[in-house]
Amino acid sequence: MAVSRDQGHFFQTSSALDEITRREKKSKNTHGNPIDLSAKLSALIRDPHNDSAVYVSTGSGELRHVDIDTGHIGKPYIGSKGPLTSIAISQHNLFGGSWDKNIYSWRLDQRNPHNILIGHRDFVKALLLISRSSSTILISGSADGTIMIWDGQTGSRLHVLKTEGRGILSLALDPIASDTVGYQAAATSITFFSGSSDRVIQPWTLHAEDGWKNDSVNPQTPIIRHETGIEALVFDDDGDLWTASFDKTAKCLNRERDWACDTELVHPDYVRAICIDEEGGYVATACRDEEVRLWDKSSGELIHIFSGHYDEVVALVFLDRLRLIVSASIDGTVRTWSTHPQDIEKAKLEVLEANDPDRGEIVETLNAGAILSVEEEKELEDLMADD
């Protein structure tokens, strides 16, 4: 058994001490240009008012604004009595779902909450906000198995949707079925999907004329395509649904084929998050194994594994203008990964050089001025492989 004089290491097994040592060593890497917030991170959302910034929530119950370009970390939004697990943002307000069962609302220019939405009986795991000219609707999903509909401007609770399953883990707006076109449009109906801890994906439709009530007369059929909980849901520009699950897979569910699985991306551990680069044709996933994976959206081929985080990656967003994947981890860092083709090839080269410096020099020479195709790269790998 390993021996240590550190009092924090007493009564720990050799494997636990080895893991501490591994993480301490890996924490020194600068891959992904880490921005350190010195707190466990739990959720991430793009800043709609700044296309190079994000908001991130922490296990200490704070929300922070992070400018990816400059690395500047804003003063914390405070008030939650527990870790914040989800974020939503409107034109003027920021919302945080908390482990203490409440939803906190802040003015963007104020750091203390101006409203607290109370109603859930367990922690709030997911938030979805739909802002239009005539209304702002906030939808919350909780571990108590309920979905609540709120007036996002007043904080008044409008309705409660009760599910037959377990806790709600994820929410996503259906851009095709919802009658919403741009911020200035007055929404007449909203369709969203929820993912639960018991593998059920449930579509819901709310109607403005009914005070945003769900159509309980004609309930929509649940979708079951995973073996266990649905941690994340994202729609692509084609209207197909991408999912991330605790069953170690991410999937693309095809709208035109009654949500049949078109693509399955297999991982070594729980899949926590997913985002899409439509311009590049990529899908990125975050896994509990600390890695961010980049996949070809059409073929499902694994393009590259971005390594840098030294603890579980819990959230991803994609910044379109910068062509950057932004990742947040329990390790307390926000990191970025470029999807520009030349940057992907550079990242691949760095991995080759780390594993075999001579091989990296050969690839760099052959690749000067041109990007190898997948087939060419495979052929080169075969030629350079040891006999």
Image: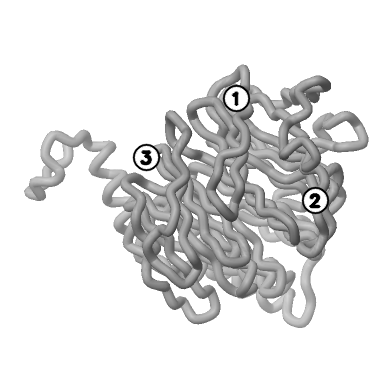
Horizontal side of 82 relative to 152 (left or right) equals left
Of the image marks 1 and 3, the number of the one nearer the N terminus: 3
The mark tally for this picture is 3
Q: Position of residue 286 (x, y in %)?
A: 57, 48
Of helix, strand and loop, which one carries label 3?
loop
Q: Which residue is mark 3?
A: 100
> In the rendered structure, which disc, 2 or 1, sits on the residue that comes first in sequence?
2
**Where is residue 157 shown, x and y percent of the image?**
56, 39
Callout 2 amino acid: Ala
Q: Tag on residue 187? A: 2
The nearer-to-camera label among 2 and 3 is 2
The residue tagged 1 is 228
Residue 281: quarter of image: bottom right
Q: Nearer the viewer, mark 1 or mark 3?
A: 3
Residue 280 sits in quarter: bottom right
Secondary structure at numbered mark 1: loop
Q: Is residue 72 something one can see in this rendering?
A: yes
Give the residue type at disc 1. Thr
Residue located at (69% from left, 78% from top):
365
* CA distance for labels 2 and 3: 32 Å
| Residue occupying the point 37% across, 71% down | 75
Foreground: disc 2 or disc 1: 2
Q: Is residue 182 above or below residue 228?
A: below
- Who's the residue at 73% across and 75% down the image? 366
- Please report whichever mark, 2 or 3, sits nearer to the chain's N-terminal start: 3
Quadrant showing the N terminus: top left
Specify few, some or many for label 2: CA neighbours under 10 Å numbering under 14, 14-19, or 20 or more: many
Q: Are marks 2 and 3 in contact (CB under 8 Å)?
A: no
